[in-house]
Each structure stands twice: as C-alpha cells, then as structure tokens.
Image: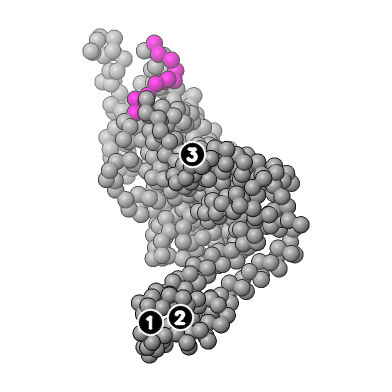
Amino acid sequence: MWKAETRRTYDRKGLRYPTDLPDAEWALARPFIDVPQRGSGQRRVDLREGLNAVFYILGTGCQWRALPKDLPPRSTVHDYFVRWQCDGALGRLHHALYEQARARAGKEASPTTAIVDSQSVKGAERSYGATDGRVSVGSGPDIWIKRLPMAFAATPASLAETASATLFVALELSRSTWLGALHSPLTNKVSQHRLDGGDADGRLALIARKQGQAQEKLGQPVRVVCCFEAGYDGFWLHRWLCARGIENRVLDAASLLVDRRARRAKTDRLDAAGLLRTLMALERGEAQVCRVVRVPTPEQEDARRRSRERTRLVVERDQHTSRIKGLLMTQGIRDFEPTRRDWQARFEALRTPDGLPLAPCLRAELLRECRRLWLVMEMIAEVEAEQKAVAEEEDGPAARLAQLRGIGLAFATVLGNEVFFRDFRNRREVGGYLGLAPSPWQSGGVRRDQGIAKSGNPRARRTAIELAWLWLRHQPGSTLARWFHERVGSSKGRRRRIMLVAMARKLIVALWRYVTCGTVPEGAVLKI
C-alpha cells in the first residue's frame, strides 16, 4: 500500500528521466561501480550518468543507438557496462541490495528454504561411470540435499571471479556438422556457430578470434575452457585441443542432467546450450553436475585393441560355427564339427540320412563358410600370440593376474587393459567403474533396491562375472568361494545368480588390491 513516506521515497518528478538515480540510490550504488580509470587521463564521463544510461536502456527497452543525446555516448556506456559486468560489480550490487531488502523485512541475509517444482529438477536419464560407487537414481530427500545447496552455494561475486576472464566453449559433435556454443566474458549471451563435421581448424580459428576479441577488450589474458560429449569421435579431438593450449573436458553423455517430463524438446542447439551450462557449473566447483571421463593415454588406448579385437573375432567364430551347423541340421546331419582339423575329410564324407550327397549350392556355401571360419580362427591365434608375447615382455597387471590359478591370459589382458590401467582411490570406485555398485531407490517411506547400476565398462563387468564362475571352480579353498557357498548353500536359480554378482564385486576388489599392493586374495593359490 502506498503511503506518504513511500511516495516521497520513490518520487521521480524532479528527475530528468524516470529511470535516473536519486541521490540516495546513487550513494548505495557508487561504492560498487567506482571502477579505476584506464590510463593516466582524467575521467570525462560521470559514472552516475553512465549508470543512468544503463537504467534508461533497461527501463525503456530502447536500442543502444537510440540513447538520448544528453546521456553519454553509447560506446562509452557500453564499455562501462561490460566492465561492470565482467568484474562482478553489478552482481555484487544486486547481492548487497538483496541482503538489505531481507534485513529490512526482518529476515536472515540468505534464505534457508526453497520450494522447487519437482518435475523441473534435472535428472540423468541413466547414471554412468560413478567412480565413487554412488548412483543418483530416483527421487527423495537425498536428491534435494545433494543438489539444492550446490545451486545456492556460489555467490554472484564468486561467479564473476570465475567467469571474468574465461571463454567457455561447448561442442555438439555429429558426422555432418559441429555446433559450438560460446560464452564470452564480454557479454552475457551465448552465441552458437555451426561448422562442417571434422573441421577442427575452423573451430580453432573461431575460438582464437573470440579469445583475441575478449583479450583486447578486457586488457588481460583470457582462458579457454572447452567440453564435448564422449561419442564416436573418440579422444583425438581432446588431445588435439589440449596440444594447442585449450583446457578440455570429455563428459559422460548419460550423466548429463535433463528435464524429467515425459516429452521434452531435443535439438542440437538445446544440447549445446545444456553442455555449456554444465561446463560453467563444473568450473564453479559443482562436481556432481555430471561425470567427467578420464581420458586414457594413446598407449593405453592402443593396448586395448588386442583384447577387444579378440572378443569380436570370438563372436564371429561362433556365428560361423552356428551357421554351418544350422545349415547341416536342415539336412538331418548333426555330428559335424567344423572346428576339427580333419574337417575337410569329414566334410567330403557327409551324407544325408537317406544316403544322398549334399546339394551343389549348399555344398559350395558350406565350404565358403568353413574357409571363413578357419580364417577367423587363424586371426584369433595370431592375436593370442601377440598377447602372450606382450605379457612375457612386460611385468604389468595382466602378467600378475595370470599368475593366479583360474585366470587365463585372455581374462588377465581384459582386466589389465580395461580396469587396472587407471588409479582408484577406494573399493567403491572399483565397483562403480564396473557398474557393480547398488542403485537404491528411496522416496519417503518407499525403499527398494534396483539391483546393480550396470554402468561403467560393460566389457570389464562381463569379464568379472565370468571370472567369478571360474573362481568357484579353480579356487574352491579361497575365502571368497567359502563365503559364496555358505550363503548360497543348495539354492539355485535367481538367488545363486544374485550372490554370484556380489561375489564378482568382492573378487574384483580383491584383484585390485593384489595388482596395486601385491596382497594375494585370502586362500587363493598361485600357479606353479
């Protein structure tokens, strides 16, 4: 309700424009915007007039070129506005006025409670790569406890200090086009630029141009921070950017927070803007806003090729074998093994149950399938020979794992190149990296477990579960094997499978301690 005192306070009749600052308001704003003069000359423009011009544009919505002639020139006003914005003067002024308004209302300087629309809270579609073993799935008090304080922890002053001399770049990569979103310290807007897919030089030229403009305007070095999602482009772009002095982060796409509504807009422009906001949040110190991928070295990435190639070749071998047996099954032939060394002689002697030879076209197709099968088997033998030679030359994790009974060279190579090439701080990070960490669901009085997260490295998780079965067979006297049999007993089916996954998690942690510290799993037997 308007009162006589309130009307006198907000009376603008004696001012030139309704947006001009009275003396009382200018006295509050002056300590925050009194920026030092550049050079040794005298300031020819009154700061109060410059701030009046900014408020005139905000109040009337006019263009910069439409400023009245009795106000300072638009170039001078814009220069002051950029300097106030970049050094955080406007943010500090807003924060001080905000605290004063709360103090007059008899409230604390900072709010302690916030009411948030639950559907507007961002959530990850699926949580990948939680290195500490924690998975944020579902809803409940833990979601608010973890996320709300991060949203209010950074004051406007700290945000300005972080972004004052930083050029943020987010890349949305695809095969045909690269869309880049840039946030320059000169402006509070996000500009988006589209280039042809793979045009790294054009992207670098754009970043250099924006960086040069910011450095010339601010008069200080400008840091460039970039990010993009992990995908089909691999890590070559990350290494290419880092080699040219650009700080880059590779983000796990599945860990990015998205709107949880049933239907949400999804375009490259929106994705690029979302990546940019995530990058700026990471720079502010919000580590839980997404997962950052630990990029392997070129040597580590190349060492994985043998085990991954062998896995693909084994799958291809099984496909050819199944195809050959399936074709012969249609003719009533069940006892032919195409992987035997005498397969050619046995193939020539094949007859159908009624004594007839194979049809010509079918016979030719089966011969080609057998030749492809043996070509794949030769490749598998070649890859395994290379793995054995590397394991004998290097005393790495794979060679140490192969010393345990029940772990062959193939499994040891997969675990050494996929898991133990990196450093883990604790056992929760080991389980989280393999996706063997639990994913609880708690909301109010509802509590249930959703099973393992199934995130992280699928090859390592599959190998760990297969190795758990072999461990029970070849290490029956180990503590882990006895732990499994005590809890499972004679149970079969689902309970046995669940306990085996739990044992796989314990086993991979025990192997991590064995590789890093040399502690042999309790009760395990080494190969002689």
Q: Marks 2 and 3, Cα distance to the nearest angstrom?
A: 44 Å
The magenta segment is 106-116
**Mark 2, mark 3: which one is toward the viewer?**
2
The answer to whether the residues at label 2 and label 3 have Cβ atoms under 8 Å apart is: no
Residue 262 versus residue 336 in the image, above or below: above
Residue 49 in sight: no
Residue 105 in sight: yes
Q: Marks 1 and 3, Cα distance to the nearest angstrom?
A: 54 Å
Q: Which residue is mark 1?
A: 353
The answer to whether the residues at label 1 and label 2 have Cβ atoms under 8 Å apart is: no
Which secondary structure is most common in the magenta stretch?
Answer: loop
| Outermost residue, left side | 1
Q: Position of residue 296 (x, y in %)?
A: 60, 55
The N terminus appears in which quarter of the rendering? Answer: top left
Choose the circle earlier in sequence order: 2 or 3: 2
At label 1, counting other C-alpha atoms closer than 10 Å, the crowd grade (few under 14, some 14-19, many 20 or more) is: few
| Outermost residue, right side | 528
Per the image, label 2 sits on a secondary structure element best described as helix
Per the image, label 3 sits on a secondary structure element best described as strand
Q: Which residue is mark 2?
A: 369
Q: Position of residue 480 (x, y in %)?
A: 62, 42
Q: Residue at x 32, y 44 (%)?
A: 65
- For the residue pair 202 and 313, the one nearer the viewer reads as 313
Q: Marks 1 and 2, Cα distance to the nearest angstrom?
A: 22 Å
Choose the circle earlier in sequence order: 1 or 2: 1
**Mark 1, mark 2: which one is toward the viewer?**
1
Is 459 on the left or on the right of 450, as rendered?
right
Is 518 on the left or on the right of 20, as rendered?
right
Q: Which residue is mark 3?
A: 438
- For the residue pair 194 and 480, the one nearer the viewer reads as 480
